[in-house]
Image: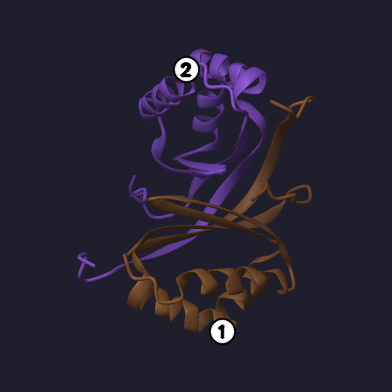
Chain colours: A purple, B brown
Amino acid sequence: MAIAQTPPPPYYAVIFTSLRTSIDNHYGPTSDRMVELAQQQPGYLGHESARDGLGITVSYWESLEAIRNWKRNTEHALAQAQGRDQWYRAYKTRICYVERDYGFEADDFSD
Amino acid sequence: MAIAQTPPPPYYAVIFTSLRTSIDNHYGPTSDRMVELAQQQPGYLGHESARDGLGITVSYWESLEAIRNWKRNTEHALAQAQGRDQWYRAYKTRICYVERDYGFEADDFSD
């Protein structure tokens, strides 16, 4: 997984923080499918994801409308419902306006 | 690590996404110390962190001024410099205004 190559701000971010249950039931394939589907949405700019106990997924979007459309996507809505029923003990979603960003890359990428 | 218990929006988020080098050199203790120090800053609201290859740390703040003050904290500034010199191959910092949030908690927290 890489750092998302987003365009210059402003743009939007959705921070999805979650705690899993121990129920698997196709979580992995569904999660992969949601990434694939999100990438096909208009206004998708990128995403980043990590989990060690707590899971954090941040997706980046051109507009609030793009976020709304993705939330309402039928297949995604079904996955969200299954998430509440089976996969997640708890989650929090935060809708953010990214005002500014800056970064760093080491000259020598070999350690 | 838990989901941060933030107050109702609006508030601010700093999304810090990073790729580590293989250099340790007190990374763990310094990271722990930065969390301890951040928690003492005025305007700190909480933080969430996960790493599996990619690392994502999100810290939450009352205001942009609180974020600026934390960035300029002397001990934190030293850690940032060591981060660029030793610990990180690359990172990106995004400053965000959190407009809206919503969450979910399962009734039965046992799996």
| Label 1 packing within 10 angstroms: few (<14), some (14-19), many (20+) | some
Q: Which residue is mark 1?
A: B75
| Subunit ID for the residue under disc 2 | A
Q: Amino acid at mark 1?
A: Glu
For the image shown, how many numbered marks are present on the structure? 2
Residue at image x 54%, y 73%?
Answer: B29
Q: Label 1's element?
A: helix
Quarter of image, res B107 = top right
Q: In the rendered image, which quarter contains the N terminus of chain A?
A: top left
Q: Which residue is mark 2?
A: A26
The answer to which image quadrant residue A93 occupies is: top right
Of residues B14 and A57, the one drawn nearer to the viewer in this rendering: A57
Residue found at x 69% / y 40%: B101
Q: Position of residue B22 (x, y in %)?
A: 31, 65
| Depth check, front residue: A33 or A64 | A33
Rendered location of residue A33, percent (x, y): 40, 21
